[in-house]
Amino acid sequence: MIAVKYKGVEQQFAAEEISSMVLVRMRETAEAYLGSTIKNAVVTVPACSTDLQRQATWNAGVLASLNVMRIIPEPTAAAMAYGLHNKVTEWGVVENALVFDLGGGTFDVSLVEIEFYIFEVLATAGDPHLGGEDFDNRMVNHFVQEFKRKKKKDISGNPRALRRLRTACERAKRTLSSTEEAVIEISCLYEDIDFYSTITRARFEELNMDLFRKCMDIVEDCLRDARMDMSSVHAVVLIGGSSRIPKIQQLLQELFNGKELYKSINPDEAVAYGAALQAALLTGPNNDNEGWMSDLLLLDATPLSLGLGTKGGDMTVMIPKNRAIPVKTEIVISTDYDNQPCIRIQVYEGEGAKTCDNNLLGEFEFSIPPASKGVPQIIVCFDIDANGILDVSAKDKNTGEKKKVTINKRFHLKQ
């Protein structure tokens, strides 16, 4: 739960409720602009969002009174925007676009193959805890130490001072994308002490170089997963505010042997544009799009492997990472000893060989009648829909008994 204090009153909200408030505000803004009521929406999520996070996003849309037609990854939406903007729409012309999406709190890389309105995600990689906020944190820590050194005061435990310093650092970061030096000037930062300092682009880069290089490593991971070399990538598309950082662009260009980066679409708007295209596709053709919209097809992929926990703590992969969705797969399991009363089905997400290295999405018990070891035949089915949301079911081949679960934050069982 998230505690929110407003006008002296503190309230507790779930993350979905906070997200739904943002969606409500966005819907109201769009309705005011369009002059009509909005009921349907396509919502985007970071590419490496877990199944739980996708389900929570869906729930937020429902709380906002929206019919969520589809949830799609942000880089995939951006690739659609790039494909239409760059007119990659001829039969026989195949283009591989690498979408580099570096936002405030997450980093995603997706490799998308585009051919005549068909957008197929070949591979996805990323870090859900890497983004512009991390660069800000490095700068904040730098100035906290400088303030301590110059003023003999430690502001690290003062939330108000840190909040004001962070705002100034965010502003300085944006300034450094266009100039070589930025000024930090805050009146009465702490105990009526004014603070004035400067930071150069070179120093900012030095503070964050390990994080910048981590971004490049993730790009290489994505290419490796797709079994594609850099020369086969036709375009590197920059998305997200932090992709404007000059050093990031320099390292990325060097990684691709001097290839010019694609900057012709607004990195702040490309994802929304792609989501709008997907919404237009799902709502059907009209006078504006019927000439081409029916040809548009999005083939998304799983961001993480999904599997079962098995004996010895092993992870049995049911659906591997980067498998095209929607997808459905089954496995038959049985009992380990005579008259075993039930089988515990544990669903995991991740790339580790052992379940302890992966994320437990949920678990449920499936009751079975008494029988000798190995006799019961339980069919376990993993079914991922076009939104990337997972249903897991278990069925006894002998009795026909079935139990189904949709993996979400509250783990509701559906018989």
Image (tube, rainbow, N blue to C red):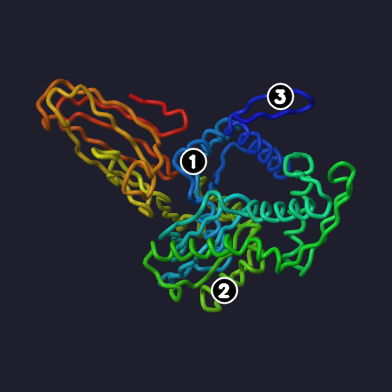
Q: Residues within 10 Å of mark 2 (few under 14, many from 20)?
A: some
Q: Report whether 272 appears left or right of 321.
A: right
Q: Nearer the viewer, mark 1 or mark 3?
A: 3
Q: Which mark is residue 253?
A: 2
* Residue designated by label 3: 10
Mark 1 or mark 3, earlier in chain: 3
Q: Which quadrant of the figure contains the N terminus? A: top right
Front residue of 308 and 24: 308
Where is residue 29 shown, x and y percent of the image?
71, 41
Q: Secondary structure at mark 2?
A: helix
Where is residue 106 shown, x and y percent of the image?
57, 51
C-alpha span from label 3 to label 2: 48 Å
Q: Which quadrant of the figure contains the C terminus? A: top left
Type of amino acid at the residue the image marks with label 2? Gln
* Residue designated by label 1: 54
Q: Secondary structure at mark 3?
A: strand
Q: Quadrant of residue 123?
A: bottom left
Q: Report whether 212 appears left or right of 337.
A: right
Q: Quadrant of residue 402?
A: top left
Residue positioned 79% across, 52% down in the render: 147
C-alpha span from label 1 to label 3: 28 Å
Q: Secondary structure at mark 1?
A: helix
Residue positioned 52% across, 56% down in the render: 108
